[in-house]
Structure formats: C-alpha cells, structure tokens
Amino acid sequence: MPLLRLRDPYFNYFHRHRLHVLRTSLGLSLTYLLIQTLGIPHASWALVSTLMVMGNLPHIGGVLDKGGQRLLGSVLGASWGILLMLIPDSPPGVVPVWTLIAIAIATHATFATRYGYSALMFGISLLLVVGSGDHDLSIALWRAGNVLLGTLMGVLVTLVVLPQKATDVLRFLLADNLDKLARLYHAHTSATSDQDLDTRQLLKTTTAQLVKQRGLVDAIHSERRLRRDELEDLLSLQRRMLSTIELLLESHWTTRDGHDRIEAMSGLRDEQHHLARVLGTLAFQVRTGQPIDVEVGRFDLQRYADQAALARGPDGRILFSPSGYLWLNRELARLAHELSLRLGGLRRLPSRRLRRRASHHTLISDARRLVTGTTEPDGIDNEPQGSPEKGRDRDDRK
C-alpha cells in the first residue's frame, strides 16, 4: 500500500468497512500479544474492552466518545467498588446494598442523556470489582486494570492505523446528498429528463444518508471540529431542501391550464437549471475541501406576477397552482443560499488535505473544472466523477 494512502481521506472513506475490520483485528491481536507477553491475570476483560470500544464504530470521533465514556464509567465504578471492599469488617449485606444503590443512582442520573454508556460501564466495572463478595482486592484491581488496558488499546489503534474521521464521513455524505438533490431537481425541471431516473430510490437514499449524518453529531463533537449547533443547522437545511424537492416532485396539476401557465413563463427554466448547477457545484466544493464560493440566485417572483397571480382557466376559476409552484422554487433557492452561507462561514470546512488528494482521484481537473453556469441546461454533471465513491463528506482544515 503506497505511503500516501495512509493519509488519504478518500481512500479511507471508500474502504472504511474493510479498514475497520483491519483495525479491530489488529487491536485484538495487539491486546492479546500484550497480555500474553506480560502474563496479566484475568486478561480476557482486556480483550472484551478492546472489542467493545472499537465495536461498530469505524471513525475516530465515535471511538473517542465511546472510549471516553467507558473510561469514565470504568474508573468511577472500579473506584467505588474498591472503596466498598476496603470497609473493615463490613456487616453482611452492606456491600451488595451500596452496590445496588450506586448503580441505581448512576442509571437515574444518566437517563435520557448521552452518558448512558458511562452508567452501564460504571455498573459493569463495579460488579466486576465486587465480584461474588469474596473481597479479594487483588482480583478487583486486576479486573479494573484490564478494562482500562483494553479501552486504551482500542482508542490507540483507531487513532494510529489508517484513521477515519467522522468529520470526513459527514463531508462526503453531505456532498453526495447535494449531488442527489441536484439530480432530482434537474430531472424535475428538464423536459428531456432521464426516464430511468428512480426518484423514489434517490429520495430514500438521501433520507437514509441524512439519518447517518445525525448519528455522527456526537462523534464529530468529540473530534472538536464542528459545534453541535453548526451541525444541527446543516442537518435542518438539508432536511428542508429535501422536503421542498419532494413536494415539487409530487406536484400534480389539477388542470392543464396551470401547467401551461408555468411552461409559458419566460426564463423560469433557465433559473431552475442554474439552481441545479449551483447545487452540483456546492457538492463539488464540499467534497474536495474547496472554499465555498457559489452565488445562489434568488427567484424573482415579481417578474412572473402577471402570469401567476389571479390566473384563470377557461371556466373562469382562479388557478392557485402556478403561485404555489413558484413559491416552492423560491423556497428551495432560499434554502440553498442559506446553506451556502452556513458552509462558507465554517472556518474549518476548507481542507488543504482533501484538496491535495482530490486531484489523485480526478475530482479536480485543470482541463474541466466545475464552475457555476458553465454547463448546458440539459446537464449538471460536467466534473469528472472518478472518485472512489460519489458519497463524500466534510472535514476541517488541518
């Protein structure tokens, strides 16, 4: 494997599942070698802790968050257990009662919070230390030490071996969602749209990727890259844009007259195609770590006011559909504009690391660089798509 691949976020993202298996296997192997070499008693708990920390979390932030909670719960649980065992000549039932009280308090304190895993580890560590009530302090200390050893080993391997940042995952998922939104919107506005485009599947995939992004909030916060409120804003804007496009796709005309009114509006399609290209450009800039530099034009509804307002069909009935349709387009443009401003305001969003590696995946081409307004109305994908995977996420300056 070339040395440059070790710091290639695109390579790490594309192979994230295989690399996670590699990291987990390596973490378990190193832990096993360490405990066998040192002859550590009760060492199985170190292996369990390594696997529990790495688990199904292939990125740094997730392991740091889970590992931190595990360390916190383990230290507190083991400490409380040792204190109980140091009580001289404790009456029967004192240790079990205070063990149960401590677990109940920890569970209550973390109920409906993100620290529930710490409470779980507090209880497990406490029970490991107290054991069956034999009051063997050496066994208690070895059990607690093995939990800490396995946790630290899992965190170390995740940080060192082909690390995958949760911020990168978010970046690529966001970029892929913007690409899909651009395709959906362009298909809706193009008279020659691809008949094979499965809009339902694209909507389903975009929604699923939005859910995945929400699941990364805690991990990204642990990486100290983006604040929670910034992430919530990005997720909210994506969700609202997706809902708006879905409404446009599901729009049905009660009469042919409303549809004809829309088709007769000069310049409307050009504005729509421009917005689709802007979304594609925004996705490209996010994916490749470029500074966000797009101009999202606002739909000028006033120019269509005479054709949309109080329009009437042949039967004399007022047509409300043209006005509603125009409002949805303007709302999508407004949301895209707000999203570009939020992305442009993130100080750590541009990434030199991603820009350097993007050219190796033909994401950046000097001959064909994606620039807003350079494509024909019938197409929005004029940038080479030779990346390992279209889903790309966002990272911070390094």
Image: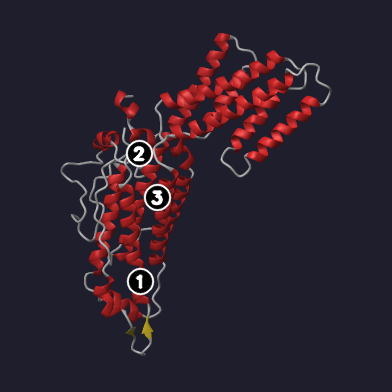
| Residue 70 figure quarter | top right
Answer above or below: position of 285 versus 101.
Answer: below
Q: Tell me the SS state at disc 3.
A: helix
Say whether disc 3 or disc 1 marks the residue closer to the N-terminus. 3
| Residue at 31% from the left image edge and 61% from the top image edge | 333
Outermost residue toward the top in this view: 38
Q: What x and y, as percent, mark residue 121? A: 62, 30
Q: What x and y, as percent, mark residue 355? A: 26, 37
- Residue type at mark 2: give it: Asp
Answer above or below: position of 95 versus 37.
Answer: below
| Residue 135 figure quarter | top right
Q: Which mark is residue 234?
A: 3
Structural distance between the alpha carbons of marks 2 and 1: 36 Å
| Residue at 64% from the left image edge and 13% from the top image edge | 41
Say whether disc 3 or disc 2 marks the residue closer to the N-terminus. 3
Which residue position is annotated with label 1? 325
Which residue position is annotated with label 2? 395
- Residue type at mark 3: give it: Leu
For the residue carrying disc 2, how many other residues have a C-alpha within 10 Å: few (<14), some (14-19), or many (20+)?
many
Q: What x and y, as percent, mark residue 248? A: 38, 66
Q: Tell me the SS state at disc 2.
A: loop
